[in-house]
Amino acid sequence: MDELREKLLKANMDGNFFEFIQDIYYQDRKGEKLLPSILAELHNTGKLNLVELFHNFKNTPENHDFFSVRRVFEEVLPNINAPVKDVAECVKHLTLEAGQDMAAYMLLSPFKEFCKKDIDRTQALLDIALTNIDEDFDHLTTAIEAGASNDEVTYVNQALELLTHENELIIQRAIFALGRINYQDKTLLEPVVIAITKSSMSSPTDVILATSMRALFAVVSQSDDLESLFLDFLHTHSDRLDDRYIHAASEILFYDEKKVSSNVEPKLLNICCYTKPENKGTINNIDFALERILKSNRFDDCVLFLEHFFELSEYKLSVKYFDSFVRELHNHRDTHLSALLTRWLLSKRIKLGKYAYDLLRDLDKGMSIGFDRAIVTKESKGVHLFLARKACGWFFNQPKTAISLIESLVFDAPDDELADIQQLIFHPLCVSYPGSIRDHLEALNKSKEDRVKQVATDVLSEYEEYQVSVKAAFKINELSPSEQDRHTYWRHHNKLMNESMKQARKKSVLTSLLGGNESVLLYGNKSIHYVHHGEQKTRQEIPLNEISTSFEFASMHNLDPHGLENMIWQFKAEGCTS
């Protein structure tokens, strides 16, 4: 301990105090953790002035251990003796130096402990916060929180008095502080709620209302009898739907999920429906809240919220931005996901059809999923063919998804619709994807369901006849390009491929990792690379491995691209009223 004490003093004298702390920080954390206590002792005996030292500590690019060193001050702070004004300025400096980092405000908790150790410190900080109002930093909340820990009634009453202050920033911070207190005297709760509610009505700006919502929820959550007052607040300001107010509602739904009752949740969700699409932070909070609601088996609440949100935002933001919710949907593929696909493809809204596609768009090869038969059977005549065409239109580029959706309709489809559905499977699906669709149909040909088996047999038979016609067309010389034309085309194709490869190399992640160096394989079954270390180099031999992938392109894109595009668009837009 004495050795470490001497080293710290010497480092301070030599002007490399922080460099020394950086060197020993992690070593001390693994050992006896002597550093904080020794620093506090040196400061309190006047051998070091930690407050002055850290007040000059900067978060510079070369100082990569800024947060580690600042962590030392966090541990020392509650145990030092220093003027409150100096400590407050130091805490402000270190907090602002941290920038937008999530750990920026971690100093406030030890600073509060510093103030709690002496009631005079708390009062001094309160006086500083009210005398020199700092727009960049909030010392008022720390003062009220620390004071309430020692004398709850006195400091709560002081905060209530500040709710009528002429400065709106003071009002906002007082409201925030009242929401941060863990009240031991429960008789204070109702007067605090009433005072915040009254203050928010006197100054209903967006920031005051947002702060009031958070504070009120925190206070009423500490009692079983005050929820109605919070609901009254939400009702009173139901028409004040600015960005901060909505964001506050989303934060309560996400961060305080266990405290949100069944009466409060619908009100907060209704507020969140008015979120602007560009407010990504609010959208993320809502996304996590919807994931939680879905996990609690309240699927209908999620769907109603999303549809209301889409309508209010004029469909400017897709469901794909609620990625946590969508991931949870995929955990219920045969229930919730199937039901939502069915609902949105039946909606006769082209945007909701697009969002149904977005639910599965990241699955390149598609997935096996069926329509919700319970929903389909409740619909009017013609719905089976309508959904089959929607499935073909929206999921044409994912044939596995398209055929599985259509397959689920075969069981209950009326006979007069079944023939048209069967023709849809043949053209454009089977004609376009003779590989995957035929494999699927051959599997269905072994089904125990007579209807499904019959459809598969008929489509396969029709496709065989189609193939005979195609092969016959090859015998017509006029339809075959000459050898010279084929040679010209392949030269043109190779040129396009070479240009494409050059462009791909420029953007290749692998090329950038290798520093732009490429190796040409002349012979053998290994690739040889040299890694340079200054003037020396190391030879590396890497065995070659096969890397392959497969794509199935729709043949109709080559045979009749414009006709296919028109057909797909008709399927998507058919019956849509908006």
Image: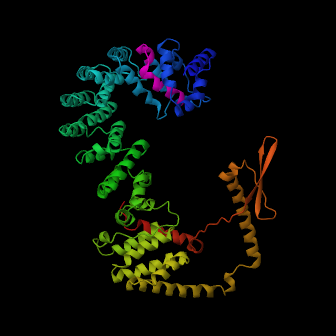
Q: Is residue 72 magenta?
A: yes
Residue 138 visible in the displayed image? no
Residue 419 visible in the displayed image? yes
Residue at left 51%, top 77%?
Answer: 437
**In the shown orientation, is residue 55 left or right of residue 494?**
left
Q: Nearer the viewer, residue 199 or 102?
A: 102
Residue at left 60%, top 68%?
Answer: 550
Residue 225 placement (x, y as % from top left): 17, 38
* Colour scheme shown: rainbow
Q: Quadrant of residue 375?
A: bottom left
Q: Give the residue at the far top of this rendering.
A: 46
- In this rendering, the answer to whether 544 lies above or below 322 is below
Residue 175 placement (x, y as % from top left): 29, 28
Q: Nearer the viewer, residue 196 or 305?
A: 196
Residue at left 69%, top 81%?
Answer: 480
Residue at left 59%, top 68%?
Answer: 551
Q: Nearer the viewer, residue 268 or 140?
A: 140
Q: Quadrant of residue 249?
A: top left
Pick the quarter of the image with the N terminus. Answer: top right
Residue 559 placement (x, y as % from top left): 59, 75
Q: Which region is colored magenta? A: 68-87
Residue 344 placement (x, y as % from top left): 36, 62
- In this rendering, the answer to whether 288 lies above or below 362 is above
- In this rendering, the answer to whether 433 lies above or below 31 is below
- In this rendering, the answer to whether 480 lies above or below 277 is below
Q: Nearer the viewer, residue 379 or 446?
A: 446
Q: Is residue 238 magenta?
A: no
Magenta: predominant secondary structure element? Answer: helix
